[in-house]
Image (tube, rainbow, N blue to C red):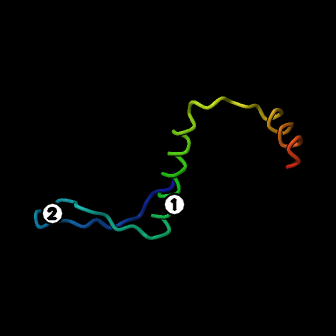
Amino acid sequence: MNKLKGLYVVNEKGRKTAVIVPIREYEYLLQDLHDLMVVAERRDEPVVNFEELKEKLRKDGLL
């Protein structure tokens, strides 16, 4: 796993209140979050094996 690099913003008591991360890392985090949301939304969909998928794509003229 990739170790995130960031700077913490602290309040006057020294408690961490925010983090600053490079924009590229932030964009990767957003993409990962999106991917996880898609997986969660599709969790209960029926499973299609690879051979069935290839056959369907052939029938539809997409492969």
Q: Considering only vertical position in the picture, is 18 above or below 61?
A: below
Furthest toward the left, the residue is 13
Residue 53, picture quadrant: top right
* Numbered circle sitting on residue 14: 2
Most foreground residue, 3 or 16: 16
- Contact (Cβ within 8 Å) of mark 2 with mark 1: no
Q: Considering only vertical position in the picture, is 38 above or below 18?
A: above
Residue at x 43% of width, y 70% of height: 22
Please give the residue where the numbered disc 1 appears in the rendered image: 28
Residue at x 52% of width, y 53% of height: 32
For the image, the number of numbered tags is 2
Q: In terms of secondary structure, where does tag 2 sit?
A: loop
* Numbered circle sitting on residue 9: none
Name which residue type carries label 1.
Answer: Tyr
- Mark 1, Cα crowd under 10 Å, few <14 / some 14-19 / many 20+, is few
Q: Position of residue 4 (x, y in %)?
A: 43, 59
- Mark 2, Cα crowd under 10 Å, few <14 / some 14-19 / many 20+, is few
Q: Position of residue 2 (x, y in %)?
A: 50, 55
Most foreground residue, 6 or 61: 61
Q: In terms of secondary structure, where does tag 1 sit?
A: helix
Residue 44, picture quadrant: top right
Is 18 left, or right, of 27 in this rendering?
left
Residue at x 15% of width, y 66% of height: 11
Name which residue type carries label 2.
Answer: Gly
**Number of the front mark, 2 or 1:** 1
Q: Please report whichever mark, 2 or 1, sits nearer to the chain's N-terminal start.
A: 2
Q: Position of residue 24 (x, y in %)?
A: 50, 68
- Report how far apart the C-alphas of labels 2 and 1 lie in the structure: 29 Å
Q: Considering only vertical position in the picture, is 57 above or below 18?
A: above
Residue at x 51% of width, y 60% of height: 28
